[in-house]
Every structure is written in structure tokens, then in C-alpha cells.
Image (spheres, rainbow, N blue to C red):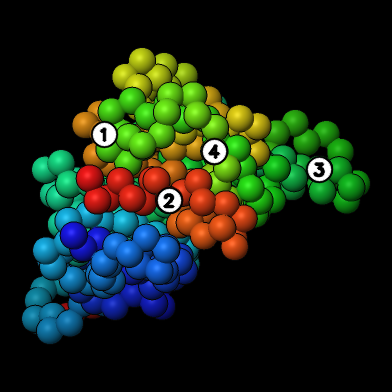
Amino acid sequence: MGLLQPGQLGRGRAVGLPRFNKPARLPVPLFHARVLVSLRASVLDPAGEATRAAAERLGVEGIRRLRIGKAIEVELEATDRAEAEAKLGLLSDRLLANPVIEDWKLVIGDTSTGGLG
Amino acid sequence: MTVGIVVFPGSNCDRDVHWALEGCLGIASRYLWHEQRDLDGVEAVVLPGGFSYGDYLRCGAIARFAPLLEEVRRFAEAGGPVLGICNGFQVLTEMGLLPGALTRNRDLHFLCQSTELSINPGACHWLRDYALGERIQLPIAHGEGRYQLDAEQLDRLEQQGQIVLRYTSNPNGSVGDVAGLTNRAGNVLGLMPHPERACDQSLGGIDGQRLLKAILR
């Protein structure tokens, strides 16, 4: 995301942009999450098919299905797990995945305490 | 009459559109930087082709959040003419102004060729100077132009007359041979082919001229 600058995407619309002038505040739990985005089963995945063909040429036999998706790793501050899930749900539905062609799945790991702002 | 051409980092057909409008058709145009927050009084908006934000995440996914596009949405919803070409079509679907999504071409190739299209102009503002069933030639240049929508919704679009452009020989695997779509009001058109590259006879054809000239009406 090196090309993106603060303000370029509209205030508060995109997660992951650096924040400036962040006031000092109390520690907030930090959630480590992974959003798995996959093409819906009904959507053709020509890149997956090409990769499957290459796997056969590599000599790996028996692959019945190979579909390519994305894994997006997110570290997120939230007061509790429910808030983290709500934020990540909005992020996944509206930005990381396109529900017309993709499904997404959320994996939230352990929390740790974020540092002082 | 002035046409606004939206410029994102990574747009690369903005100048083609500018040339086609001013050089070939004598229609005034103005570039609109994506960070602007107003449309500067333009009377039509073109979202040009290219690779906005490097096609990061998905084609058009990040461009959709550009400040200017909130204004484009308001303009479109108020009935203003909006044309999305190639990457611009991808942006319009990501914005939800047009249904469906554009995905990787069936055969993975980036396709750069002339295609024949069949036109069903319906209520589309941009296609009013074309006849029902007319066939035209426009170039395509895309790697992710395979239109995707479920069968039920595709039927609905068909019944509502929104599928205005179809490939006669489907190059990319689009469902329903869809090459271009309009919204229900007919003021927004998104298409993968490039009408701006078919406005000068020296480039092989002028079938795109009437589409861009619709801006004047």
C-alpha cells in the first residue's frame, strides 16, 4: 500500500493508513486477524486451473481441486473481541472481498495489549 | 458542454479520451483529479481505462473510495451522464452503480484486439444514436473483463433491457456475452471495449464516435 497517502481514500473509509497526531491513550487490546478471501464456487478460476495443470506437469498427481484466493493479515485495535469482529466484518464485506464473486472467512488469533499511543 | 475525465494514479486512457473528445469530436473536456471533492461544473463524467491504484486488491476496488467518486455517485444518481470504459466499468461495478463484477479472462490472456458488438440500445443515453441489433467494431484491451453475475440476476437485467452491448464472438468468457451494461435510468454506461480508440479513421474505425457524441445531447 506504499502509494496510498492519508486522506487519499476518504476519511475513515480505509483501514491501515497511518494515523497522525494520535493522542496518548490507555492500552487497547490488539487483535491479530487473517481474512481469507476465496472465489465463490460458482465463479470460474482460470488461474487456479492453470496452476493445477502446472502441478500435474510437476508430477504431483491426484489434485482434485485447486482454487486461488487471498489471505490478508490485519492487526487491529478494539476494546473487545465483538468489536474486533464487527470492524473486521465491515472491512471484509465492503473492501477486502467483493460479495458478488467472493466469500470471506475470518480467523482471529490471540490478543495482546497494544502499546501506549 | 464540458466533459470531466477522472484521473486516478494508474489511469492510462485518460489522454485517449481527451484526444477523442477534443481532437476528433471538438467536445471540450477537463481532467478531474481523484482527490478533488467537486466536479467543477462538468456536464458529463468519463471514468477512463487503465490500472487505477495498480489494480491492487481487485480492479477498481480502491478507486471506489476516492473522494471525487462520492460526487460522481451523487451526479449519477441525479441522472447525470456517466461513462465507464474498461477500468472505469470495473470501478462502476465496485461502486455498485452497475451490478455484477469483472473477473480474470477465461483463458488468462490479456486480450488486445478488435471485437464485434451487437447493440440493444434500450433506454441508454449513450447509445441512442445506434440502431437495435446494429453491429459495430470496437477494440478491447483487458486482462480482467469476464463479466460475472448469477443467472437469475442476469435474466433480470436482460428483461429490464440493461444488457446493451454483447460480444458476437465472446472473447473472454463473460456470462451472457456481456460487453456493456447500463443502469435502469439509462444515464450510466459501463463497457469493456474502448470507444475512444475508435474515433479516428486512421486507427481503423470510427464506430465509437456516436457513443461519445451522445454527450452533446
Residue closer to the observer: A92 or B180? B180
Query: Looking at the picture, how far across and down is residue A82, in whole percent?
Result: 20, 45
Q: Amino acid at mark 4?
A: Ile
Q: Is residue B199 above or below residue A16?
A: above
Q: Which-is-in-front pick, marks 1 and 4? A: 4
User: Spatial distance from mark 2 to mark 4, Cα to Cα?
Assistant: 11 Å
Residue of label 3 = A53
Residue of label 4 = B136
> Quadrant of the rendered structure where residue B155 is?
top left
User: Spatial distance from mark 2 to mark 1, Cα to Cα?
Assistant: 19 Å
The chain containing the residue under callout 4 comes to: B
The chain containing the residue under callout 1 comes to: B
Q: Horizontally, is A70 left or right of A62 in the view?
A: left
Q: Amino acid at mark 3?
A: Ala
> Residue B209, labelled with which disc?
2
Residue B121 in view, yes or no = yes
User: Spatial distance from mark 3 to mark 1, Cα to Cα?
Assistant: 43 Å
Q: Amino acid at mark 2?
A: Gln
User: Spatial distance from mark 3 to mark 4, Cα to Cα?
Assistant: 37 Å
The chain containing the residue under callout 3 comes to: A
Mark 3 nearby-residue class (10 Å; few <14, some 14–19, many ≥20): some
The chain containing the residue under callout 2 comes to: B
Mark 2 nearby-residue class (10 Å; few <14, some 14–19, many ≥20): many
Same-subunit check for callouts 3 and 1 = no
Residues at marks 2 and 3 touching, judged by CB atoms closer than 8 Å: no
Residues at marks 3 and 1 touching, judged by CB atoms closer than 8 Å: no
Dot 2 or dot 4: first in sequence order is: 4
Q: Residue furthest bottom?
A: A21
Same-subunit check for callouts 2 and 3 = no
Residue of label 1 = B186
